[in-house]
Amino acid sequence: MKTDRTKNTSKKHTLDSKLVLHKTSKGEIEKGIITLKSGNGMYIEDVDGNKYLDMESGITRPVCLGYANEYVAKAVYNQIMELSYATPCGRSNLPAMELSERLSKVAPKNINHFTYESSGSEAVESAMKLARLYHSAQGNKHRYKVISRMGAYHGVGGMGLRALGLMTPMRHSFEPLTPGAIFVNSPYCYRCPFGRRYPDCNLECAKEVETRLLFEDPDLFSAFIGEAIQQGFGSYAPPREYWDEVRAICKKYEILHIDDEVICGIGRTGKMFAAEHYDMEPDLMTMAKCISSGYVPLAAVGISDKVYDVVDNFMHLHTYGNHPVACAAGIATLDVLEKENLIEKSNAMGKYLKETLADALDKRPSVGEIRGTGLWVSIDFTTNQETRAEFPMSNLNSIITQALKLGYMIKAMPNVIELAPAYIISKENIDDFVKAFTQCIIDEEKRMGLAK
């Protein structure tokens, strides 16, 4: 049957629209979703003219510079006119070389080499391939397993998907996957999977890594992958000793450590990389999102000298790898971050956001914990302060809906509402948001019978 191409002339996205969205059900589309039209600074506007303060940097958190930054836009235009494309194999290009030089000066001191992809998922895939190549080059082709954490998100590529410990329907939908993914519990102290309380827990979550390795045979493992600060539970920073313990285990069994900085890198946590909070020097490091402020798809893998010196040929190819225009956007983003001291501002504004939330929500019965590092802050909700009972997702979604009606765009994960605004946010923006957000919480508590 021939499709009627004139059927949907509306600017709103409907079931008749030809565009297929990611991770969006037809039921959600029928209820009505926002169709975005424009963005400037901290604000975005939809096709109906509604304006929203974006407290999530584009929901998936890349827009660290805010919208419509002319410096980045001009850099992208200039590069397109200079050299719009270059193959990633057998040829090099100047923007990719320059960005690598720039990143080598701000990454952990052992990370001195970089390769570029178009998404965080691809970066994770590349890092896992490099880990395999590292071991294979030393005659250890049997090292194929990867250890990840329940609650982790490492993208939706084939290798990244197998390490996906969060949103299990996404992983289960595509099983069977490449074998070799092993999971351990995450360091989620607020709802400890072992029923313990830090610091009297003996760091069981870290020690479990060695227990699983020994059960599975550590000689079969190529890498441990984890975010320095984990997004699956809402910007959760583990105790410092956790990473000391995990890294010691990796070193003991000659397993590479992949630090996934796709979300928490490039200033999100108030430092260039979240690894700096733990003085970590990983073997491989992934980054994306804020590396180009979302203006052009760009991701990277940082490679340590240890890995680079062993791997002779990165047997891998993506058409848009090391893309000169994307790398030009990355260079321009670093320029803006440095010239406007935005990473320092991310740290300062993050502290102000947490303090303002704490003052406003201190006595709210549904608020269990407010946490965060830099401009990555989460509110962990509960229906019982003593037992830390989980908060219904339907009620979190209700809070989000009410906030949207008031002009504030936020997002939720199980039990948590997460905030990750652009680094250009002002105190006035924060004050206005917290006032409206607090009222949304109070209204929802009343509907739930948690407050009068």
Image: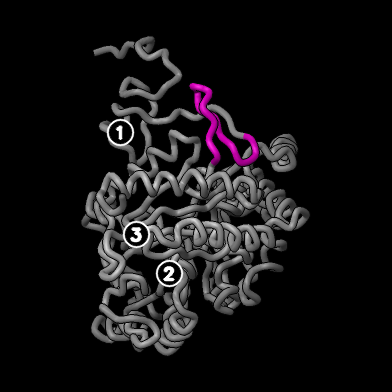
Nearer to us of marks 2 and 1 is: 1
Spatial distance from mark 2 to mark 1, Cα to Cα? Answer: 32 Å
Task: Give the residue pinned by disc 2.
Answer: 226
Q: Is residue 278 visible?
A: yes
Is residue 330 found left or right of 384 in the rendered image? right
Q: Position of residue 104 (x, y in %)?
A: 68, 67
Three-letter residue code for mark 2: Gly
Return the residue found at the far front.
Answer: 452
How many circles with numbers are drawn on the protein?
A: 3
Spatial distance from mark 3 to mark 2, Cα to Cα? Answer: 32 Å
User: Which residue is nearer to you in this view: 435 or 286?
Assistant: 435
User: Which residue is nearer to you in this view: 199 or 207?
Assistant: 199
Mark 2 crowdedness (10 Å alpha carbons): few <14, some 14-19, many ≥20:
many
Residue at image point 31% right, 24% down: 15
Colour setting: one colour
Task: Give residue 365's mark.
Answer: 3
Three-letter residue code for mark 1: Glu
Residue at image point 71% right, 49% down: 332
Compare marks 3 and 2 and give the one earlier in the sequence: 2
Task: Give the residue pinned by disc 1.
Answer: 28
SS state under label 1: helix
Is residue 225 found left or right of 54 in the rendered image? left
Spatial distance from mark 1 to mark 3, Cα to Cα? Answer: 30 Å
Q: Is residue 45 shown in magenta?
A: yes
Q: Quadrant of residue 43?
A: top right
Three-letter residue code for mark 3: Pro
Is residue 77 found left or right of 399 in the rendered image? right
CB atoms of marks 2 and 1 within 8 Å: no
Mark 3 crowdedness (10 Å alpha carbons): few <14, some 14-19, many ≥20:
some
